[in-house]
Image (tube, grey):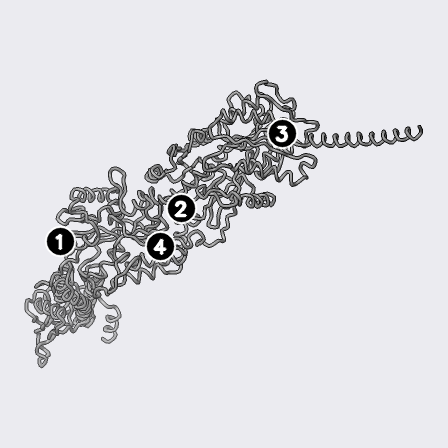
Amino acid sequence: MKFTTDFDYGAMERRKRRVLLLFILMAKLNVGEQQVLRIGGIFETRENEPVSVDELAFKFAVTSINRNRTLMPNTTLTYDIQRVNLFDSFEASRRVCDQLALGVAAVFGPAHSSSVSAVQSICNALEVPHIQTRWKHPSVDNKDTFFINLYPEHTSVSRAILDVVTYYKWKSITVVYEDSTGLMRMQELIKAPSRNGMKVRIRQLPLGSSDARPLLKEMKKEQEFYVIFDCSYQMASELLKQLMSMGMMTEYYHFFFTTLDLFALDLEPYRYSGVNMTAFRLLKLDNPYVSSVIQKWSMERQLAPPRPESGLMIGMMTTAAALMYDAVFMVAVASQRASQMTVSSLQCHRHKPWRYGPRFMNLFKEAQWDGLTGRIVLNKTDGLRKDFDLDLISLKEDGTAKIGVWNSYTGLKLTEKQDNSNNVTDSLANRTLIVTTILENPYVMYKKSDKVLYGNDRFEGYCLDLLKELSNILGFNYEVKLVSDGKYGAQNDRGEWNGMVRELIDHIADLAVAPLTITYVREKVIDFSKPFMTLGISILYRKPNGTNPGVFSFLNPLTPDIWMYVLLACLGVSCVLFVIARFTPYEWYNPHPCNPSSEVMENNFTLLNSLWFGVAALMRQGSELMPKALSTRIVGGIWWFFTLIIISSYTANLAAFLTVERMDAPIDSADDLAKQTRIEYGAVRDGSTMTFFKKSKISTYEKMWTFMSSRKNTALVKNTREGITRVLTTDYALLMESTSIEYITQRNCNLTQVGGLIDSKGYGVGTPIGSPYRDKVTIAILQLQEEGKLHMMKEKWWRGNGCPEEDKKEANALGVENIGGIFIVLAAGLVLSVFVAIGEFIYKARKNSDIEECISFSEVMEELGISFRCHKAMRKRGKPRGRAALTGVLCNSKRIMRKETVA
């Protein structure tokens, strides 16, 4: 009995242990079921893409969370995935009901807007969070209370684009959108013109086709250089290829792509094109955590790499995949904060909501996470992501680079450092530029060679040397092409341009290196560097025929006035000499020296002899007449000095007049051209010289343009060579740049420059407007100028054999201002001789007076009268007289006193 009882007690204990173990095991199993969190994903499939990128990122995120237990240490995250066809909203609704019946804490997807709305309405009714990672236009009634979108809010992105446009100071932009949702995303930019005075042109990509080349061709024709493309990254990849084929991948275009996946595209073919390409990036690639996740993603994607036609780089994570990854992690973060939350099965037809739905929704909105796309903070009112950072990236030669950051609160801030120490060759190195030019000696000429030359070797000249020096400094390569129509560039009445200017406007060429004049009208449509040569407009005309000296050309060395003055001086000196010789007693002499008592006195200076004396001295010949008195010698000496200067000046100037041919030029200036119509004149058609006269408001130049425009067929020439031929063969004057005239006259001695410069201007290197090359070319030109290379190049190409050095074309006749001083000396000498003659007369009269040495006026006048009354060279000697009366007598008191003492 006792044994039986013991046996029953032991069996009971064992039974209790078994029940306890079973209870513990059931408790553990029950606990394990509570720590499993299921989420649902609805993803759309395409024919060529059975598994979407969103689905792959969804699975990748769940796997990462389950592998790393730091975020959900006591919970296992599971998922249910349903695949639906694209645009099939009914199927999407049925699939989401299946997932809700299974029991999910949140629903992810789908991506297309029509399916999203259907799924969203069911989630709102059953109060289950619906998480979206693609752009969706918010509902008007704002009743999507259980909607969460991690994609940046569209109005904030639109403001970010507007800030970029404002920073670059674009005044005219083109918005190219793929579908109608693009216009919704660009609302802030479309409304900008009313506030900022911006011109916005809106275009749409062709529907149902990826060939946008007709649209791009029209944009290129309209010169739309600043373009914003709102499209998917797949379309962006196709557009880049088509832009390259259309020749629009150049420095003059700036493309902005609104897709956040531009960084993920293969941009290798466009790195060295020089095109300006910018976009926003949401992924924080410079974060080590993000880089490690993308590296793991790349390893996962090796099993299902992206299609080549998508344009994505292998292993690169798109923004949609990163947002899906961050969204799954946000669910994990929110679930950790939810305690005692159970996921129940929900039926769509019963309309019984999940009782933990509002609580879990609030926890999700309050959650924050530093994910792949930066700090994730949701708006607690509408569940949208309004606080975010966008990296502004730009295509560089070494790939895409971050140049700035845009924040929804602080706006755009550039982070790219402008390194001014970099050499100017950085952006031009190894690039090949198209250079347009025109044949014009000595700027651009065909090189003479026995061999056939190709490419740039065909040409030589000043501009080719300049281009070579610019290439050496800036490091670019170049291809020289002659302008197709052979014109410099002018604007017609319809405002259309031709020539090299047109090729720069159409971006057919990158540079115009030629004798292209910097003008106001050209500067409005193209850009110019600083001038590499300064010049002005002048007149090219043939040299006038020389005139041989005439029969009476020996009279030319002196002006007619001087000849008249010389003749009057000769007559005047002869008369003065005659009077003084008669007046002075020392010119009277005894013709019979053997008879001292002879009363006959003789004087050689008769009127004819005095005239002969003056003429003989003027002709540098001797004369038998020689003055004896001091006064007459003064007259003779002064006259000889006068004739010395006159004859020397005449002789020196005579040689020039007899040996130099005198040029008879019909015109000497532009005024002479304007005043006549016999000589035809003009300029090169559609050149800067023609434009100068056409736009000038100066009366003389307006008159000249009226003349030229009335004879356009004959006055205006096609090119300089034609103009030179006309100048040489007809009576024609060509208006052109002074530097070209200088070159031509050095090589053709029959041509000359007439007059001075009409204006002042310069030659510059032309570039399309807004070209990044303009400033760099300017710096290089200034460097060449400081080094003296521009001067050396001009000396090299302008120096010719030259024409024989000519003497002065016409020796100037000597006028009064040249030799008038000798007449003053002559007059002073004559006056001096008169006073000396008076002194001699008085002295001689006193000597012949009585012993008291008193001279009466009557005796003086009588003596003077005898001298001038004698028509012959003889007179009687005067006799001494008695003492004169006291009145009218000149006495020397000392001599009188001496005479009295002697007496």
| Gap in angstroms between the C-alphas marked 1 and 4 | 41 Å
Q: In this orientation, which residue lies closer to the viewer: 170 or 327?
A: 327
Asked whether residue 136 appears in the rendered view, the answer is: yes
Q: Residues within 10 Å of mark 4 (few under 14, many from 20)?
A: some
> Residue drawn at (43%, 50%), measured in percent from left and top?
272
Pick whichever, 732 or 462, lies toward us. 462
Residue denoted by label 1 = 730
Q: Callout 1, which amino acid?
A: Thr
Mark nearest the camera among 1 and 3 is: 3
Which quarter of the figure has residue 854?
A: bottom left
Count the numbered circles shown: 4
Closer to the chain start, of discs 2 and 3, is 2
> Which label lies toward us, 3 or 4?
3
| Label pair 2/4, CB-CB below 8 angstroms | no
Q: Which residue is mark 4?
A: 478
Q: Is residue 218 left or right of residue 33?
A: left
Q: Position of residue 344 (x, y in %)?
A: 64, 24
Which residue was labeled with disc 2?
A: 251
| Image position of 160 with respect to 848: above or below | above
